Image (cartoon, helix red, strand yellow):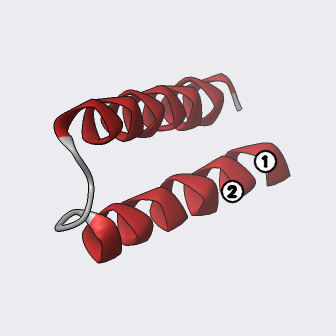
Amino acid sequence: MMKAIKLFWHKYNYLEYEILVSECLNDELKAKLQKKLHYHFDQYHSLKESI
């Protein structure tokens, strides 16, 4: 359960980070960040379902 919560907050921090710096990021960096976001989101959901 703690892992899922940790991942959830990790994802939330990425979202917050994306909002803060979205104006400054070029497309390549934005794409990398989106990829990370989706990865952590998927991880969170698969962990949540397996609990």
Question: In x, y percent, where is residue 11?
Answer: 51, 52
Image point (53%, 36%), residue name = 40
Whole-percent x and y of residue 26?
A: 22, 45
Q: Give the class, few, some or many, for how many residues have Cα within 10 Å of label 1's Cα (few <14, many ≥20).
A: few
Based on the displayed image, in which of its 4 quarters is residue 27 positioned?
top left
**Three-letter code, disc 2:** Ile
Residue at the location (79% across, 45% down)?
3
Q: With respect to residue 2, does 31 lie above or below?
A: above
Alpha-carbon span between mark 1 and mark 2: 6 Å
Q: Which is nearer the eye, 26 or 19?
A: 26
Residue beneath disc 2: 5
Q: Which mark is residue 48?
A: none
Q: Which residue is mark 1?
A: 1
Asked whether 3 or 34 is in front, the reply is 34
In the shown orientation, is residue 36 left or right of residue 38? right
For the residues bearing labels 1 and 2, Cβ distance under 8 angstroms: yes
Element assignment for label 1:
loop
Residue type indicated by callout 1: Met
